[in-house]
Amino acid sequence: MFFTWAAFNAFQYISTLFFQEVQDISPLQTSLRFLPMTVVGLLVNPIAGFLVARANVNTLLGVSAVITAVAPILMAVISPEWTFWSAAFVAMSLIPVNADVLWTMSSLVICRAFPAESQALAGGVFNTISQLGNSVGLAITAATCNHKLSI
């Protein structure tokens, strides 16, 4: 979870910089480009919950990781002249898949693996690790991007 959330938030940060600094798009238009993430996230969570009892968890996590890995590759090769629909839309749609599948699977595993009296503690530790991943990922990305932008 730590590394998944760190990478997810780093992707969001760098995508924001790409849209606003490279493509010179307004903050409102940039925000609209993040809507596919919300829609996909809303769809992936119930699907992952449905599939967890019907498929191998490791397979689900592996497939979702491969799907999500396409997003940064697309953003790495994107040209500033391309329209949003040519590559960025696909990248923004694919990036939340692994994070949402992993969150759903991990939450269910915590519920199954721990006795009722310690599930709250396990969930709290899980959430803390996720938030630390957010913080560390954003900190490293911001420090790296700000250093590169100031050159």
Image: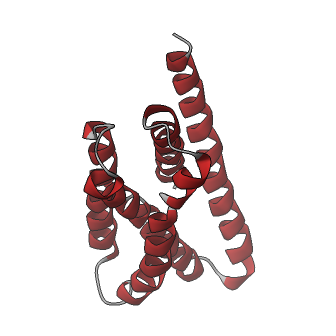
In the rendered image of this protein, does residue 60 appear above or below residue 47?
A: above
Specify the quadrant of the image occupied by residue 80.
Answer: top left
Residue nearest the viewer, comparing 7 with 110: 7
Query: Residue 138: x and y, percent?
Result: 60, 39
Between residue 129 and residue 92, name the one nearer to us: 92
Residue drawn at point x = 59 percent, y = 25 percent: 143
Q: Position of residue 14 (x, y in %)?
A: 48, 39
Residue sitting at x 50%, y 78%: 42
Task: State the image coordinates of residue 17 (x, y, percent, origin top left).
Answer: 51, 37
State how many labels appear: 0
Residue at x 26%, y 71% (from the top left corner)? 59
Residue furthest out toward the top? 151
Q: Is residue 28 found left or right of 78 in the rendered image?
A: right
What residue sits 34% from the left and 46% below the top?
Answer: 72
Return the x and y of residue 41 as percentages of the image width and height. 48, 72
In the figure, 140 relative to 92: above or below?
A: above
Residue 125 picture quarter: bottom right
> How is the rendered protein coloured?
secondary structure
Determine whether, in the image, residue 32 is placed left or right of residue 122: left
